[in-house]
Image: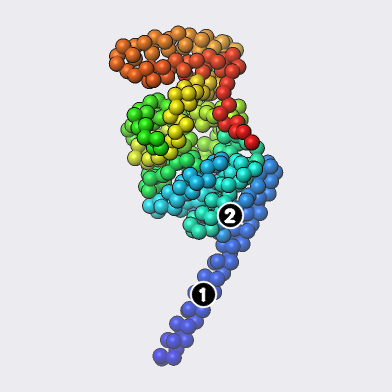
Amino acid sequence: MTTQSALARTTSSHVGTDLSRDRAQAERLETALSLIAVKTAAAIVGREIVASSERLDQQVEAVVCIPAFRRPTQLRATLHSLERQVTSVRFAVVVAENDAEGRASIVEAHHFLMLSGIPGLCVLEPRQGNCRAINAAFETARAAFPQADAFLMIDDDEIASPDWLERMVEASRTSGADIVGGPVYPRFSDGRDHLAQHPVFCPAYAVTGPVPTIYGSGNCLIRRSVFESLAPPSFDLRFNFLGGGDTDFFGRGRAAGLRFYWVAEATVVETVPPERTRLSWIAGRGVRIGAINYLSQRGLQRTPAARFRFACKMAVLWPYSLVRAGRMVRQGGSWLMAVHPVLVASGSLLALIGIRPQPYRARI
């Protein structure tokens, strides 16, 4: 009887080992086949898969997408914050490197994918531009992880709080929203914390709940169905060097009747370098916001009459912004805050006559 029990245990152990080995082989084969398909799809549009985890978990529920450009040290911190997530959600990571020359982000992505145990890919998008990189990240994520329904984005200069992913996905599940957003709080490396309340840096909302729309992709979750319902490319290439492809994307989503939700507790921290606290940069950002607002809203005007009315509205915004600025100063507001609506209105007016900044056109 004892011999039979020992034999049974030995047989069971062998069976378990065989099953485990078969499962591992099946996962490796699945990863290899998936990689071939994704690499083929990437090559068709001029992209290249340059790094991958040993295994691509096809059952992940969420994918975190990170467009990356020449900030390898900050990207490392971003990736480490994802490694420290406290969550029951199975997730993957996709990094989109947009620097075909330096490729510094690839090194960081490779180390992360090899050592963290989190499945994912790094895709090289050689065509420069903010929207190119974001589209590459989302499109690669959707192709590589066909079972995933939630696609989050975080920038390569941001750090996610430990419960960020859990809160974002949970909000998506319970609210039924198509798009979820959360706050990005600035961390000023030069200590100019008083700028945190400036509209350029301050989050759009303060309270958790349904919202009309969100404006930035630096902390967002987009469900797969959103990409399928809005016309490609997701982030319009008109905004490739201007920025604001996210504002346009969410604006089109709102026009299509999509539902938005805000999670005030799902926080992300952005490192703000000293050059972004200069008055010249803050002023330029205001002008750029105005140009983005003009282009994204004009795209929603479907008839010549609607476009004409919209142009008239943009033209009167500038004198009205002067009235607003004067009122803010009289009420005790700082001149830096008061001048912001004037700069935004100026950006819209300049965009109306074809003058638009291109901050994302980097020098090679």
**Residue that mark 2 sits on:** 52
- Viewer-nearest residue: 232 or 359: 359
Judged by depth in the image, the label closer to the viewer, 1 or 2, is: 2
For this rendering, which residue is in front, 24 or 237?
237
Q: Is residue 237 visible?
A: yes
* Position of 355 relative to 99 (above/below): above
Q: Label 1 belongs to which residue?
A: 17
In the rendered structure, the answer to whether residue 104 lies left or right of residue 91 reads right
Q: Residue at x 57, y 34 (%)?
A: 130
Mark found first going from the N terminus, 1 or 2: 1
- How many residues crowd mark 1 within 10 Å: few (<14), some (14–19), many (20+)? few
What residue do we see at 62% from left, 51% from top?
A: 50
Name the secondary structure under disc 1.
Answer: helix
Element under label 2? strand
Compared to residue 358, the image places residue 12 above or below, namely: below
Give the spatial CA distance, label 1 vs label 2: 27 Å
**Disc 2 residue type (three-letter):** Ser
Amino acid type at image mark 1: Thr
